[in-house]
Image: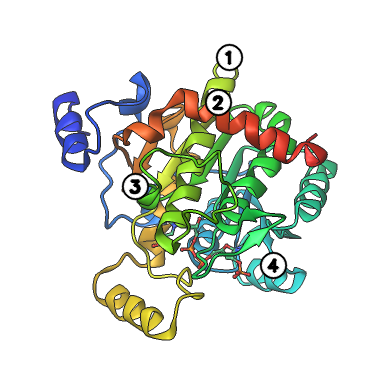
Amino acid sequence: MLSRRQFFQLSSSWALSPLIGHAACEDGLSQFRSGSTAEEVTSGIDLTGKTALVTGVNSGIGYETMRVLALRGAHVIGTARTQEKGRMACDSVEGMTTPLVLELSDFGSVVECADSVSKMGMPIDMLICNAGAIFSELRQINGIEAHFVVNYLGHFILVNRLLERVISAPQGRIVIVGSRAHQSAPSDGIQFNDLSGTTWFNRQTAYGHSKLANGLHSLELSRRLKDTRATSNVIHPGVVQTNIARDLPHWQQLAFRLYGYLFLKDLQEGAATTSYVATHENLIDVNGCYFADSNPITSDENMQDEQMASRLWDVSESLTSDYLA
Ligand SMILES: NC(=O)c1ccc[n+]([C@@H]2O[C@H](COP(=O)([O-])OP(=O)(O)OC[C@H]3O[C@@H](n4cnc5c(N)ncnc54)[C@H](OP(=O)(O)O)[C@@H]3O)[C@@H](O)[C@H]2O)c1
């Protein structure tokens, strides 16, 4: 276990800002490191009787997260964009899993998915907003930039509709898979005046913008959950060898694969921080924090901007009002 001084040293080596978002974040310190795997960080943890919902389980980090949570005894509801992809992923892991369809760019699909979960009737102990995409060109969905819709707004609706289920769990946890790429968002943060992306789109900026939205979503959720037993935290999984680059030009995909093979985290390592934050007893009271390599880290000023988080919540509510519970 790191001492408080070591924690601040570690934080400042990542540091984007000298501030730490939440006093209790350091309670989430662990001995785990960048090379720790999801199996290692959950070793000895019995999740029997608990339910996890993981989005995007047919590929990458989501698949490994589902596999390991199910291995530890949880019932994992795993979402994929088609029934077939979800069923294949669920059938290929040991343990109790249930596939559900979720297409985050289609808010009707998000509502159907949340309603199916609600009908199952149990509390949700772990709600893991993992699914995400990178688009190489500007795309808009109902006039809104597509990264913002898929990576953030769809999950905003899902969490909203399932929040009571999380709150009703003995210690419900929301884990939002963000990214250090939030640093590539525009320097003034969320582009409230042009969510279409038309005036500012480039791939990195738009992906970073959606990941900043993920971080602010968790921050505002943590404030709203303050008087409950439930928590919300955001994580950066590391740079992981997955299918996330699939929409990039071929040569960039090849470069990503080659670089990944040599230097990036593998899936077992890539799912560790999500799994740690979703399950470890260190985190029972840890709320509103930012994690990487299974340890809390400092985040930059935009990620800690409570006013921006609150405004984002209000704007998201009005954009999705027809789909909220
Ligand atoms: N890999 C990295 O280096 C890295 C770094 C930082 C953060 N992340 C984050 O980690 C998360 C998982 O990504 P990954 O790296 O594991 O990538 P991945 O292998 O491409 O998995 C992404 C998952 O999200 C699903 N998804 C994509 N678009 C969707 C949509 N419109 N509706 C519903 N589901 C959708 C995908 O389904 P399909 O297969 O059907 O498209 C897939 O199941 C993402 O949030 C990503 O931003 C990744």
Q: Which mark is residue 183?
A: 3
**Whether residue 22 can be seen here:** yes
The image shows residue 307 at horizontal and vertical percentages of 48, 23
The image shows residue 267 at horizontal and vertical percentages of 41, 65
Q: How far apart are marks 1 and 4 (CA)?
A: 35 Å
Q: Which of marks 3 and 4 is in front?
A: 3
Residue name at image x 18 percent, y 37 percent? 10
Label 4 with label 2: CB-CB less than 8 Å? no
| Position above or below: 58 against 278 | below
The image shows residue 218 at horizontal and vertical percentages of 51, 34
Q: Earlier in the sequence, mark 3 or mark 2?
A: 3
The amino acid at mark 3 is Gln
Tell me if 196 is positioned left or right of 319 in this view: left
Mark 1 beta carbon near ligand 1 (under 8 Å): no
The residue indicated by pointer 2 is 310
Residue name at image x 18 percent, y 29 percent? 8
What secondary structure is found at the residue carrying circle 3? Answer: helix
